[in-house]
Amino acid sequence: MRLDSVIFGGGAAGLWLLDRLSRDGHHVVLLESGALGAGQTIASQGIIHGGMKYSLSGLLTRSAISIREMPAVWRDALLGHATPNLTRTRLRSDCCYLWQTDSFSSRVGMLGARIGLQVKSESIENNERPAALADVFGTVAKLPEQVICPASFMADLANQYRDRILKIDAKSGLKFKLGSPGEVESIRLTSPVDGSKLELQPRQVIFTAGAGNAKLREMVGLSGAVMQRRSLHMVLARGALPVLNGHCVDGAKTRVTITSDVDDEGRTVYQIGGQLAEDGVKLEPLALAERARAELADVLPNLDLADVEWSTYRVDRAEGATGNGSRPDTIQVLCAGNVTTGWPTKLVLAPILSQEIASRASSPYVSAEFDSTPLASWPRPEVASLPWEESDRVWWALPEASFAPVRRAA
Ligand SMILES: Cc1cc2nc3c(=O)[nH]c(=O)nc-3n(C[C@H](O)[C@H](O)[C@H](O)COP(=O)(O)OP(=O)(O)OC[C@H]3O[C@@H](n4cnc5c(N)ncnc54)[C@H](O)[C@@H]3O)c2cc1C
C-alpha cells in the first residue's frame, strides 16, 4: 500500500499528528504496538499548562514562551471551534488553583509565581475557594489551566480515525526494508492476531512513540542515544476526598500538583505529582505513600485522610536528550533521511509538535481519496487504562501510627 506517511505511536503526539496530516489530505496510517497512550499520556495529569510551572523562577523561559499560547488552542479544540475536534473529550476541570503554605519559601514562591506568570492568575475570595482549600494559609489564586481526562482525549481522536489506526506486534511482526540508514523503503507487518501480512510503502516515517522512539530509531539504522528519560514516582489517593485541581507552590517548585477524577465506585481519586513525585523516585512505594500522606496533611491541613487508600506508580518521561539530563525547553524534532522523530516534552505541546512536523512534510503525493479497505480486517488497539483503573493495582490503607498497612484488592 503506497502512503504519504506512517506514524509509529498513538499517544498524544501521534494522535494529534494523525488528525493534522489526515486533514491536510495525506494518506497516513498510525501503528500502535500496545494500547493507545500506554507510557506517558495515560499516566499524565492532563493539565493544559499555560506556563505556570515554567514561570516559577520568575523568568520568561523558552518553555513558558512556547507553552503560553496553548490553553487557547486546546480550549478551541475542546469547544469544537478548531481542529482537532475534541468535543467528546472529558474536561475534568476548567481551571487549576494555586495555593501556598505559611512557610517563608512557600510565600516567596507564591509571590514569584504570580509575578512571573504568563497566564493571568486571579485571586479569589474565601467563599469562592474549593472545599479542599477552604482553610489553607494566605491567598488562593485561580489559573485558566483546564484539566482533561487523557483517556477520553485519546478515545475521542481514535474514534474519529479508527480506519487509519492499526495494532502491530513491534517485536516479531515489524520489519523495515531500508535503502540506507534512515531511508525506509517499506514496512512489513505481520498481524498479531491471524498472522496475515501487510506491506506499507510510505514516503515518510514518523516516530512519536515516546520511550519507544529509541528502539525504533535503532531498527532503521539511526542512533537511539538521542533520547533521555526522566523518572517520576506518582501517588494515587482515593476516598471521600473533595475534588481539587491545582498546585501548592514552594520557592521555585510545585511542592505537590493534585488533579482529581472520580472512579467507577464514585470515589474521588487524587493523582499527586510535583516535587513529591520527583523526590519519590528514590523511595519504595509504601514509603512514598507515607510521605504523601504527611505532605497532604501539611499542605491541606483540614483534609480528612483517615479512610483514604493509597497507591503509587512509576513512569518515565521520554524526551529528546538535552546533554545534561535537564528538562528540554520545548518540543524536540529530529530528521534524517525520510525518518522524523518527535517528542512533545509536554502533552500540552502536542499541537506545536504536529505543526512542526506537518510543516516539514511535503504535500500529499497520493492524490486519490484515502481507501482503507485493505486495512479493514486488521486488529485495532484499545485505549490504555487510567492508572487507578488497572485491575492488578494494589491499594493500601495507612492506619494512623501503623507501620503494617492493610493490603486491599483493586
Ligand atoms: C506522570 C506524568 C504526568 C504528566 N502530566 C502532564 C500534564 O499534566 N500536562 C502536560 O502537558 N504534560 C504532562 N506530562 C507529559 C506528557 O504526558 C507527555 O509529554 C506526553 O504525553 C508524551 O506523549 P507521546 O505521545 O510523545 O508519548 P506516549 O504517551 O508515551 O505515547 C507513546 C505511544 O507509542 C506507543 N509505542 C511505543 N513503542 C512503539 C512501537 N515500537 N511501535 C508503535 N508504537 C509504539 C506506546 O504504546 C504509546 O501509545 C506528564 C508526564 C508524566 C509521566
Image (cartoon, helix red, strand yellow):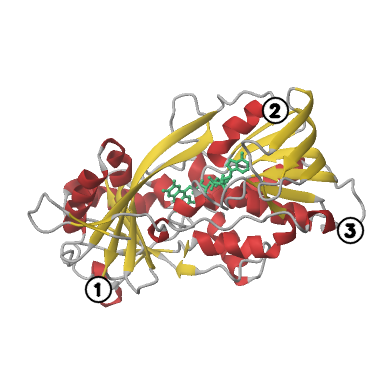
x 28%, y 39%: residue: 279
Q: Position of residue 344 (x, y in %)?
A: 57, 44
Query: Which residue lies most toward the left here?
Result: 401
Q: Quadrant of the N terminus?
A: top right
Residue 399: assigned label: none
Secondary structure of the residue carrying tag 2 is loop
Q: Amino acid at mark 3?
A: Glu
The Cα atoms of the two marked residues, 3 and 2, are separated by: 29 Å
- The amino acid marked with disc number 1 is Asn
Where residue 382 appears, x then y in whole percent?
A: 58, 58
Furthest residue in direction bottom, as rendered? 127
Residue 175 at x, y percent in the picture: 72, 33
Picture quadrant where residue 158 is located? bottom right
Write the residue at 19% across / 54% down.
Answer: 293
Q: CA distance from mark 2 to mark 1?
A: 58 Å
Crowd band around label 2 with a 10 angstrom C-alpha radius: few (<14), some (14–19), many (20+): some
Residue labelled 3 has its Cβ within 8 Å of some atom of ligand 1: no
The secondary element bearing badge 3 is classed as: loop
- Residue 296 in sight here: yes
Q: If you read the primary sequence from the N terminus, does the residue marked by circle 2 or circle 1 appear first?
A: 1
Residue 253 visible in this rendered orientation of the protein: no
Query: What residue is pinned by disc 3?
Result: 369
Q: Nearer the viewer, mark 2 or mark 1?
A: 2
How many residues crowd around disc 1 within 10 Å: few (fewer than 14), some, or many (20 or more)?
some
In this rendering, the answer to whether 76 lies above or below 17 is below
Disc 1: which residue: 126
For label 2, the residue is: 220
Q: Quadrant of the C terminus?
A: bottom left
Name which residue type carries label 2. Val
